[in-house]
Amino acid sequence: MLKQHIRSQYLSKRKAIPETQLRALNHAINNKLNQFNWSLYKTISLFLPIKKLNEVNTLLVLSFFEANFPEMIVAIPKTNFANYTLQHIQYSQNTILVQNKYHIPEPLNGNIILPSAIDVVFVPLLAFDNVGNRVGYGKGVYDKFLATCRSDVVKIGLSFFDTLQSIDDVNSFDIPLNYCITPNKVYRF
């Protein structure tokens, strides 16, 4: 299947999930976080959810790290829509979040975290295939950002759905995931 078709299909599928099921799926994903040895990492990049698109509720992921790994530095992305790049701001209890024009919560200001300091990137997606390729929203923002990270950065997707067999139009700019966490399973690539 082509990305454009996958994108349309999975946006619709995700928006159709009833609220009670959405809560259960989010908690199932969050419970899978215990399968990782987070003590190996110092800094993570964590996107915040677009609620109206029924994205995985990464606020639960944020709470997991605050409760279990309070020393972990959590960097929240802030998008520059002029050139589709990301800047990361260190999150704290005092961080002021504002919604950008796409309803993505972002830090208003704070300490900038360089890509070279990030050990793990949670990557937003709509769908992924059995070798770790993903379909995002189509602007290439995360692939651009991941290209600036260290080669050993761990890339983790979060999805309510299991893997696709393949994505037909993967290109050389697409950077695959190392893992994808779903309610049913942690996929390793």
Image (cartoon, helix red, strand yellow):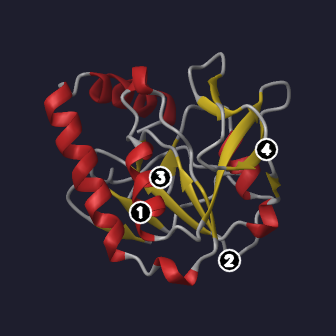
Label 3: state its secondary structure: helix
In depth, the one of 56 and 178 nearer the eye is: 56
Q: Nearer the viewer, mark 2 or mark 3?
A: 3
Q: Residues within 10 Å of mark 3 (few under 14, many from 20)?
A: some
Q: Earlier in the sequence, mark 1 or mark 3?
A: 3
Instruction: Identify the element where label 4 is drawn.
Output: loop
Q: Considering only order in the chain, which callout, 3 or 2, is on the residue closer to the N terminus?
A: 3
Q: Is residue 91 left or right of residue 57?
A: right
Q: Give the foreground label among 1 and 3.
A: 1
Quickly name the residue at label 1: 67
Front of the two marks 2 and 1: 1
Whichever of labels 2 and 4 marks the residue nearer the N terminus, that label is: 4
Residue 114, horizontal then vertical, whole percent? 82, 59
Q: CA distance from mark 4 to mark 3?
A: 17 Å
Query: Which residue bears the numbered disc 3?
Result: 62
Amino acid carrying mark 1 in the image: Ala
Q: Position of residue 168 (x, y in %)?
A: 48, 46
Q: CA distance from mark 1 to mark 3?
A: 9 Å
Say which residue label 4 marks. Answer: 110
